[in-house]
Amino acid sequence: MPPTAILPFPIAQVRAQFPALQRLHRGLPAAYFDGPGGTQVAGGCIEAMADYMRKGGANLHGQFPSSVETEAHIQAAREAMADLLNVPPREIAFGANTTTLALAVARAVGRSWKPGDEIVVTELDHRGNVDPWITQAQDKGATVRWIKVDTTTCTLALDDLDSIINPRTVFVAVGLASNAVGTVNDVARVAARAKAVGALVAVDAVQAVPHISVDRDALGADLLFCSAYKFFGPHLGVVTVRAELMERLPVYKLAPAPAFIPDRLETGTQNHEALAGIPAAVGFIASLGAGATRRERILSGYEQIEAHENGLITRMREALAAQPRITVYQAPPAVRKTPTLAFTVAGLAPEAVCRSLVEEQAVFVASGDFYASTLADILGINPAGWVRAGLSPYNTDEEADRFIEGVGQLLR
Ligand SMILES: Cc1ncc(COP(=O)(O)O)c(C=O)c1O
């Protein structure tokens, strides 16, 4: 599909879709720069969730309308996620959040791991895409190997990929985008090496899906995770697994989980009201694009989102770079990044920087290591961590100005 023209971003219409943007703090409109922690929820999604509960929710398999409707909502949620990740709907399963789903999948995928097997994780990843796998490896006596981070570029050091992923490797977990520094990793390269040795690949796309288009199979992933609360939806985790793999994953068979896919990964009763909101969360991204199918509109919507966010983040990066007391931890310009900035200010605790931005400018930012704790430890910025500012499509030029002004104020 040819790229769509980048149109003037319809910021007013976008903002009108997010009721939380009405919030004031100290008389100023809240500027939510905490998207990497969780975005605000699209109004259509809030309505769909409330509507589900208002009209009468139900459990499955009932011979009455609210039960039948609940099953339809779940199917619609699978279809929306399928379009978002370019996979068939029957390869989408839901759960509480990415970490909890990954732990359940790790218990299954790693049942056969044994001493001598190797699993690979990375130093750049959120621990939600590390600990489920290494915990299972420890339980099974398998060896854990780490893809290192190049601390000068905040990118994965892939030069020795062929020795880290080797014929003993059975499983590789890699993030698509860093939740701290925003680096977009060359996942396709890592996955190709994993395939060459017959290892499975899990991709954490939690921080990618809010900003850039994702195609599970183009990345070479066998499993791919994301969380709807990071992309304008409710607190819900999503995993897509190739059908052939999902069929044979030895998940624990509890009675309250069907034997068939994708439901076999969904133990107990799901969060039906959150599921009812999923099509509208995906719909928000699609609403920014053009095309005959939802997938086409999603792809073109992402182009608009990326262009808008890149415009704002470039200004913010330049402003921070002009301040000698500020260190921004980021990949070089040529490396693709999500609009997430992690920085420190010499002589000021990250928490104090956040408090000042919040109280002086109503710029909502947080500090810490955000569970990118391996990276933070290696960079030596723990225990205080970074200040993290991340953009969402509803952020504006005026908010970026306020952020820049707030940082300048701190340093004056
Ligand atoms: C990159 C990344 N992976 C995994 C997670 C964990 O997601 P969840 O909170 O849905 O378990 C997060 C959460 O911030 C994240 O940013």
Image (tube, rainbow, N blue to C red):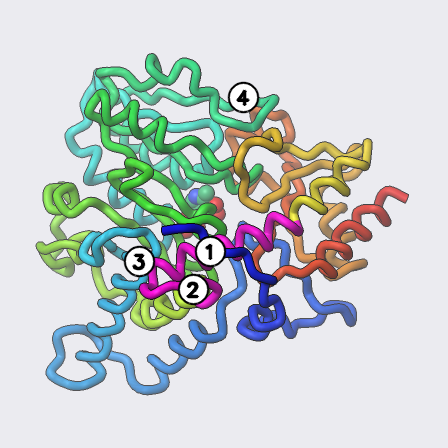
Residue under circle 2?
Answer: 290
- Decide: marks 4, 1 in contact (CB < 8 A)? no
Which numbered mark, 2 or 4, is in the foreground of this view?
A: 2
Residue carrying label 4: 150
Q: What span is colored magenta in the figure? A: 287-312
Q: CA distance from mark 4 to mark 1?
A: 35 Å
Q: Closer to the observer: label 2 or label 3?
A: 2
Amino acid type of disc 2? Ala
Q: Is 78 placed above or below 249 here?
A: below
Viewer-side residue, 14 vs 346 = 14
Q: In the shown orientation, is residue 293 left or right of residue 354?
A: left
Task: Report x, y in % for residue 329.
Answer: 64, 32
Q: Considering only order in the chain, which callout, 4 or 3, is on the residue closer to the N terminus?
A: 3
Disc 3 + disc 4, Cβ < 8 Å: no
User: Circle 1 is placed at which residue position?
Assistant: 4
The residue closer to the viewer here, 385 or 394, is 394
